[in-house]
Amino acid sequence: MEKLLFIDACISTHASRTKRLCTTYIDQFLKKNPEVTLETVVLRKGKVEPLTKERIIERDKYVERKDWNHPMFDFAKQFQEADYIVVGTPYWDLSFASILKVYVENIMVADLTFKATNTGFVGLCEGKSLVYITTAGGFIGDKNFGYDYMCGVADMFGIPETELIKAEALDIEGFDAEKIMEKAIEEVKQRF
């Protein structure tokens, strides 16, 4: 059975507009693909932790033996096995919420999600596509470094397709945030 993995980095101090777009996309995807199961990872402190010197040393010992049974590899194994990935995160500081970078550090595992060769990286993930969903208070323009970064991650992991879904200018005076969101939601629905 195929799996859709939702990486929820929809950090917000209010009702998350990013989460709203993600929910629309996931609902439409599952309606069109009822045989696909959904797995969700909510990225929060305590659930995913940054790598420290001590954790890297410990991790390297397991990587050397290719022993993926330690819980520190659970996220990487889950990501590696997913057929479809949806990443949801607000546009922050020209990229994304820092917890997403911490998550990527945890899934970037040599010989599990990618392999280094003398000609470059070879992806070991089963993913067919990665959809990156974001919302921004202002205009993103050509400074979408979060999406660019996740495209690089997808390429390194062997995921052939990436797609960006965004709603922007949500906090600019004179712009109607709800109309912008409704338009973005309608565009998501039309993809299916």
Image: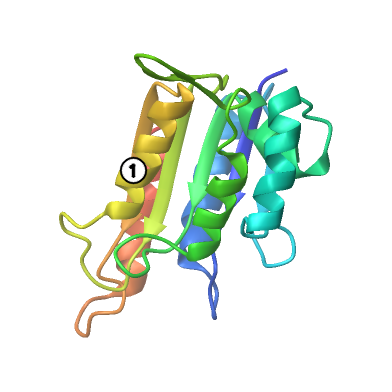
Q: Residue furthest left?
A: 142
Residue 145 at x, y percent in the picture = 28, 53
Q: Nearer the viewer, residue 83 or 168?
A: 83
Q: Residue at x 15, y 54 (%)?
A: 142
The amino acid marked with disc number 1 is Leu
Provide residue 101's location: percent of width, then percent of height. 50, 55
Residue at left 42%, top 50%? 133
Label 1: element kind: strand
Q: Is residue 164 visible?
A: yes
Location of residue 148 by image quarter: top left
Q: Tell whether 22 sits left or right of 172.
A: right
Report the residue at 62% width, 46% height from top.
106
Q: Where on the picture, by quarter, is residue 183? A: bottom left
Q: Position of residue 67 (x, y in %)?
A: 79, 26
Near mark 1 (Cα within 10 A), the count class, few <14, some 14-19 or many ≥20, is some
Residue receiving disc 1: 164
| Side (left or right) of 80 relative to 138 | right
* Residue at (35, 45) in percent of width and height: 149
Nearer the observer, 163 or 103 = 103
Tell me the quarter of the image containing the N terminus.
top right
